[in-house]
Amino acid sequence: MKKKELLQLPEMKPTKSMIRDMTEDKGYMAERYQAPSIWAPNYIWFFRVKKTKDVLEIDLFTREMLEWGADYPRYRVFLHDGKYDTFDNTTEKWRTATIEKLEYANYGYMPKYYYYCNQGIWISEKEREILQKYVKNGIGDPMAAVQQWEDYKKNRSELNKIDAEMRLVPEIPKDFGEWIKTDGLPQYIFYDAGRNVKEGYCTACKHTVQIHKPRYNRESICPHCKRKVTYKSRKKSGHMVDWGYVGLLQRTREGFVYRYFKVKQKYINGIRTEGGYWEMVRQTYDQEFRERNEFEFGRYKQTGMVRWCYKYYGWKERVIENEAILYWRNLKQITKGTPMQYAAIEIFAKQKQKFFPENYIRVYRKEKGLEQLVKCGFYRIVKRVISPYGINTYLELNEKSTPKILGLEKRYYKILQGTDPTVREYEIAKEFQEFGILPKRETIAYLAEYSYGRNFAVYIRHTTEHKMIRYLKEHLESDREQIRDYHDYLQMAAGLGYSLEDEYILYPKNLKQRHDQYVEERNERDRKIQRMEDDQKLEEYQKTIEQRKWKWYEMESGELLLRLPESPAEIRKEGNQQHHCVSTYIDRMVEGKTCIVFIRQKETPEESFYTMEVKDGMVVQVRGKYNKNPTEEVKEFVEEFKRKKLRIQERMAG
């Protein structure tokens, strides 16, 4: 119906019962912050409702209008034809605001009690029934009922799209709730406290099992189901609540959906009591596992509707996803014949790893090497690869064999094979490979735990693996802080020109004393260099190059060549031309801490192309103009440099 026709409908008048209830309203005393209480009425809005054919009209009166004797409504709200229209009698204009956004003030007058009262609504029971029959949303408050109807109609195009996609989501598997209890949350063996306790109850397999000298919070393996459990004394644990997150991947008629749940399980003295799961996010995919839409369950926009809506991404997200344990029992079946059939996501999920399944799907669609890493048991590396932070070490995820994916020679790969190494253990294996040292597996594990991310392979080349580890274990007593200081000491010794072939230098008896001595020597040298201008640093620069034998790094191959800067001034010029920060490395190069070399094209040897840093016998970084990453041609040239220069240099040094 057109607006002109709506206004031709007779507007409603105040009823006798409405006036009577307004007059007899005794109200109450509303509290105010740091001010005396103020009288407020129980009702400030008065509603009339009628239905004419397919049009529902709600006329709104204010308390003040009735007191003044007005016989017309402030607003006339019309619900019709799947939309709403509101006419303001005060301004004689149509309004676009929803019912809750309509102003209460009458000709600018706002009663003092408005902001402190409950803003109650008066409506007769008969007209309330007419309203409910029309809006059909079961909300008792008449304003809220109309508001939700208006919200839905206002956004019905978008909501219909959301509802259509939500209707594709299948039922949750029947065993999903039980799976959460046994696999989606931590498992325990509860026991009665005492010296001679011999039995406990496993929450995973629900069996009473034999145990021996359990310790509270100690992790173990259930002797019956072989699952990972934690020992808990019934008395000590008391009331305990576990919270977690699980995921469910399902096939739909148009593709797939990943569903994210928050889960809860409560224990009282070792007995499972209340628990449950709440779905929070849905990510939909097409048949090729391309992402379609992401939804969250929450308040829709600025309305009062709580429902499925498009995921909100902003400065403060309403639902922030955590890593989840993925339900794996259906994965083989639903991925059969799809691009994810050979993704090994089922194998990975069975490890009960907490991860982001959406990231796994996203990475696998681009880089199939993920499958090989999973099938070869490199679960912790895979988890890091698909994490939001990725992995710093370069992986060739489009290669087909695991050694090539990891960039490891076969003999180094065999050291890690079948052990599910951490990312740091993998990085240490790569560091040893750079220097051609074949370490023991236990050495890699030890350094990963105690070395604070320091590269010790660069110094083990001057001695033996056995001697270095023995010094760390026996002399430094595997103290992480001392091991970190020792690495810093070795860096300073090398930078100051001391020979690390000398065991007196390499293995100081009093580490702290020697460390402090070298700190003072280094600081004095740094102060001297910092006082120099570029032309004054030239002599020291040339001495450092000769002392560190960096001329060896210069080479030519194909269309490229590698040369040292002729002076500190040339390094500064390189930074200006390339628009990167290499000029800040001048003092470090003069001090011998790092080496800057220029990669040039043979045709234009004087023009800046790429800048490379070599430190401790390793290529640290290669950067082009504006810090651009190297091209494939430059990468191949750098790899050749490593083979022909760095590794040969190590053999010569060894």
Image (cartoon, grey):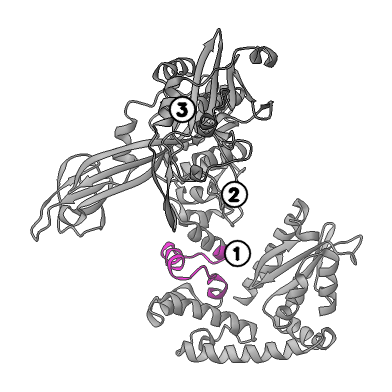
In the image, taking residue 180 as reference, residue 536 lies left or right, namely right
Looking at the image, which is closer to me, 414 or 458? 458
Residue 336 shows up from this direction: no
Looking at the image, which is closer to me, 612 or 284? 284
Q: Amino acid at mark 1?
A: Glu
Q: Is residue 593 above or below residue 345?
A: below
Q: If you read the primary sequence from the N terminus, does the residue marked by circle 1 or circle 3 appear first? A: 3
From the image, give the main secondary structure of the stretch colored magenta.
helix
**Local crowd size for mark 3, using a 10 Å CA cut-off: few (<14), some (14–19), many (≥20):** many
Residue pointed to by mark 2 = 315
Q: Is residue 149 above or below residue 633?
A: above
Residue pointed to by mark 1 = 434
Residue 437 highlighted magenta (yes or no): yes
The stretch in magenta equals: 431-460
Answer whether labels 2 and 3 touch (C-beta < 8 Å): no
Residue pointed to by mark 3 = 250
Q: If you read the primary sequence from the N terminus, does the residue marked by circle 2 or circle 3 appear first? A: 3
Q: Amino acid at mark 2?
A: Trp
Kindly report the distance in space between the C-alpha atoms of the residues bearing marks 1 and 3.
45 Å
Residue at image x 59%, y 53%? 407
Q: Position of residue 64 (x, y in %)?
A: 53, 34
Kindly report the distance in space between the C-alpha atoms of the residues bearing marks 2 and 1.
43 Å
Look at discs 2 and 1 and give the one toward the viewer: 2
